[in-house]
Image: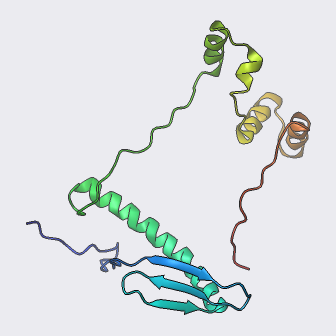
Amino acid sequence: MKSYEQPVDHKGRPLIFMNKLSIEKLEIGESAGANLEIQLNESGATTSLSPVQFGQFLDKCKLCEKLIDRAKDEARRILSDNPEAIPGWHLAPGRTTETVKDAAELHRRFVSRGGNTEQFMRALKVIKKELTVLVREVTGQKGKALDVILHDLLSGITESKTGEPVLERE
């Protein structure tokens, strides 16, 4: 049987892990002054938070997210050194992504199989940041002059999408 050493942080302090604790159910009442109910599955106890306490809870979420990221980074480090160090966990291979490095050659191959340039263009996605770099290289312009050129190039042919609202502190 392997011995288990208590993990420590960079200052030698023991890392503390929660065992079997998760938020099982969140319920928010309909009125503005309603409390948030949190039921923890470990004991079945329910905790009620006022709107002010809920705001304080959200403040702590940022810290928790940082702690979670740090714990995952540490787990990856530990498991890369010793794959059996954390029972029940292992490092799976990272995700593989592919990027076309030669769009001109891809276009040539596509056309040779019966496609045309207009069809090919539908498969492309212009990255505005990279376009900005290209326009700067081609024109030698920067600052406001570059902005004007980009505006002229993109005018009437872009689409803007707004994502989900972002939760932020006042």
Quarter that holds the N terminus: bottom left
* Residue in the foreground of this view, choosing between 52 and 106: 52
Name the outermost residue toward the left.
Answer: 1
Residue lying at 32% horizontally and 77% vertically, measured from the top left:
19
Q: Position of residue 139 (x, y in %)?
A: 83, 30
Relative to 161, say whether 89 is above or below. Answer: below
Residue lying at 67% horizontally and 8% vertically, measured from the top left:
114
Quarter that holds the C terminus: bottom right
* Residue in the foreground of this view, choosing between 27 and 113: 27
Q: Taking 24 as reference, is 83 left or right?
A: left
Q: Position of residue 2 (x, y in %)?
A: 11, 66
The quarter of the picture where residue 26 lies is bottom right
Count of all numbered marks drawn on residues in the image: 0
Q: Position of residue 34 (x, y in %)?
A: 67, 90
Relative to 34, say whether 124 is above or below. Answer: above
Residue lying at 70% horizontally and 33% vertically, measured from the top left:
125
Residue lying at 34% horizontally and 57% vertically, measured from the top left:
76
The quarter of the picture where residue 93 lies is top left
* Residue in the foreground of this view, choosing between 108 and 28: 28
Relative to 78, say whether 111 is above or below. Answer: above
Q: How is the image coloured?
A: rainbow
* Residue in the foreground of this view, choosing between 48 and 18: 48
**Residue 39 visible in the snapshot:** yes
Q: Position of residue 129 (x, y in %)?
A: 72, 42
Relative to 100, say whether 158 is above or below. Answer: below
**Residue 59 visible in the snapshot:** no
